[in-house]
Image: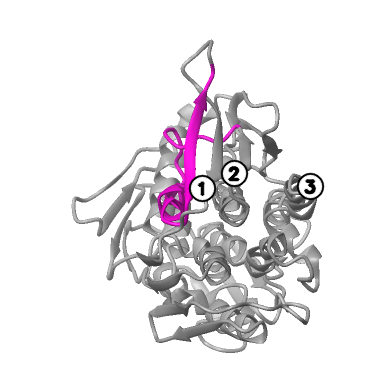
Amino acid sequence: MKTNDVHVELPTSKSMSNRWLIVNHIIDQAYMLRNLSTSDDTQLLSVLLTQLRHGTSKTFYCRNAGTAARFMMALLAFTPGKWMLTGDDRLKQRPMAPLIDCARGLGAEIRCLEEEGFLPVEITGVIPDHKMANIDPVMSSQFVSAMLMAGCLLPDGLRLTLTGRASSRPYIQMTQAVLKQADIANSVSANNRVYKVAPVTPIHSMKHKVIDIERDWSSAAYVYGAAALMPHVRLRMQGLSLSNSFQGDKVVADIFSHLGVVTREMKSPYKASVRSVTVEGNGMADSSLEYNFIDCPDLLPVVITVCAALGVNAKLKGVKNLRLKESDRLAVLQKELHKMGGVMDVTENEVTIHPCELNPTEPVCAHDDHRIAMAFGILSIKYPQLVVDKPQTVSKSWPDFWNQLVAIKEKRK
């Protein structure tokens, strides 16, 4: 091992943590969940589930956590009782209609209190007596994941038919993997359109099996960005695995290989398990990059900012759902890059980055979006004068991001 490696401590996976919290609630806390994410989103979901378990309130406030809201909506729809689900102003703008329609089709009563298809909603939960439903997954794979997990509450399980091509399909596969690991049978048809999940069985009364949550590949993307911006410094991410991970965002290794970043998996000398992943920039980014982000939209912001900083001509597709996140990420990225001299063209489903010199002279507005804050934050490696407003917004997914970035930048001194 190189003694001068920079060790970066990644958070554990928010996506894996959130799925395990829901599944563990459904199977009556059968597992001990170790190394849960410390992100705001996971901490919030844990509080909401505790609230449901102990009946302390029938109103569930999800702040700006789309995952928590969608997972809770499906769970409450199949939990007998009357509930209210709401969030902040931005969450009230994020689409919920496909999930609402699917739950209604199975017998749940959901009343939209302001605008149809959006929060806040009043839910009268039921245990459905039928098991077949359709759902539109085009805007978010979270609709599918939410229904698959809640579907195992149904007496006969759930047969869920997708009416379109799901965005972020690897996140559905992650949900399936968590269900399988929890001994809940599930399957998908060859054309990825029909999903089945079995009901929970008495076997889940077995207690105390330990589940270790893996490190987060979505957060690793910012470390890849740092490696691309400071060549010949090796960054080591302990506990991360490329070959043995359920997370679709591990494709970041392939994407950044075109931006001059080399990935190596380091295995333990004593056993076959992976010990860490190292990344190192070689300073030889391709002059152009084309990639479709339909299955990994969370990686897009950091790829855009790094391409702009490296002068890479990039044509990036599959991006339209970025408008539906914590902010309208396409509009925000375009606006903030323009402030520093960047040129980014946006069509309905494609982004083009044109090579030009960046000169950050005013603070970057993160628009209360953690991925925007981190994507621009790593540019301070190349542009020390760059400042991001409301830096605390990163706590939504990686509370220790800024401390880890400082440790990375120290290596340049």
Residue for point 40% across, 50% down: 254
Q: Which residue is mark 2?
A: 232
Report, in whole angstroms, how far the alpha carbon at label 2 lies from the one at label 3. Answer: 14 Å
Disc 1 is placed on an element classified as loop
Disc 2 is placed on an element classified as loop
Q: Which residue is mark 3?
A: 410
Q: Which residues are magenta?
A: 239-268
Residue for point 60% across, 51% down: 219
176 up-or-down from 273: above or below: below
The mark that comes first in sequence, 2 or 3, is 2
338 up-or-down from 91: above or below: below
Q: Which residue is mark 1?
A: 282
Q: Are marks 1 and 2 in contact (CB under 8 Å)?
A: yes
Horizontal and vertical percent for residue 396? 70, 60
Task: Please name the amino acid that badge 2 sits on.
Answer: His
Q: Residue furthest top?
A: 270
Asked whether 320 or 9 is in front, the reply is 9
Task: Please name the amino acid that badge 3 sits on.
Answer: Glu
Q: Quadrant of residue 120?
A: bottom right
